[in-house]
Image (cartoon, grey):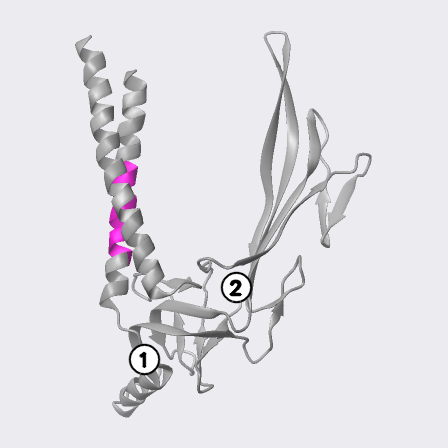
Amino acid sequence: MWIAGLVLIAAGVAAFFFMQHTKRELHAMIGTETFTIPELEDQRKISDDLGAKGSFRKSAEVVGAAHPPPSGARTSELSKTECVWYRYTVEREYEHTEYRDGKRHTRRRTEKLTDHQSNNGFAIIDEAGRTIGVDPGGERPDRPEQVVDRFEPHEGGRSSVELFGVRLPSFGGGNRTIGYKYKEWVVRPGQRLYVHGEVHDRKGPLIIGKPSEGGFFIISTRTEGELRKAHETKHKFLAAGSIAGVLIGLGLVVGQLVT
């Protein structure tokens, strides 16, 4: 019983730290102003006039439509969808067999074979056609559109299988491959985005990306209002879970020690 108590205490502590992170991210959104692209250009010009060309830094939020870079839109790997960003995963589902106590035990398991996303930059464009660059820097957009979610059974006897243009190895031994699960998400051109980060001009044009000295970086298909509401709800659940986990866990541990 005391082991379960320790597990609950650990879960409560973890929930507390997640709660604090959620709270800081919420406060960052509340405390950061949303700027139009012309406003940011004006502030950059003032910085240039003061002799700080290339050193402009500004914590900001920007809202607009996703727009391809000058090199053009990308094409996602699996569905061949025109987009500015994509991510896909491939998982293998298999039966794992092992023998214990003279008995055969077979379980269905899943392993991730690949998890890849594009890292090229794109842009946000406003109603007047003005743009600002977005440097994802490995960040995954919040709530992208899912365009692939399918399972393909494995055909036995092949040394490898090719699905959606991806060649995967086969696995022998006691693991029988059942099939492969494919998922893909994209951000299409024209998708409305909310971006919270740091605007800079290190490369010339204005770009918004990860803060250079720490802080939060958010790319989302949800509005700021929707994100704030979700964070507030998440904070409440984590706070309740943290308190409940620690109190119940301590109760179990103390109860075990007393008995």
Instruction: Give the amino acid at mark 2.
Output: Asn
Magenta stretch contains residue 224: no
- Residue tagged by mark 1? 55
Q: Quadrant of the N terminus?
A: top left
The residue nearer to you, when weighing 44 against 89, is 89
The region drawn magenta spans: 13-25
Q: Is residue 17 visible?
A: no
Dot 2 falls on a residue whose secondary structure is loop
Q: Which residue reaches farthest bottom?
A: 49
Q: Quadrant of the C terminus?
A: top left
- Residue tagged by mark 2? 119
Instruction: Give the amino acid at mark 1.
Output: Ser
Tell me the quarter of the picture where residue 77 sits: bottom right
Q: Position of residue 5 (x, y in %)?
A: 27, 22
Magenta stretch contains residue 22: yes
Binning the other alpha carbons within 10 Å of mark 1 as few (below 14), some (14 to 19) or many (20 upward) gives some
| Among numbered discs 2 and 1, the one appearing first in the sequence | 1
Dot 1 falls on a residue whose secondary structure is loop
Binning the other alpha carbons within 10 Å of mark 2 as few (below 14), some (14 to 19) or many (20 upward) gives some
The residue located at (55%, 72%) in the rendering is 189
Tell me the quarter of the picture where residue 157 sits: top right
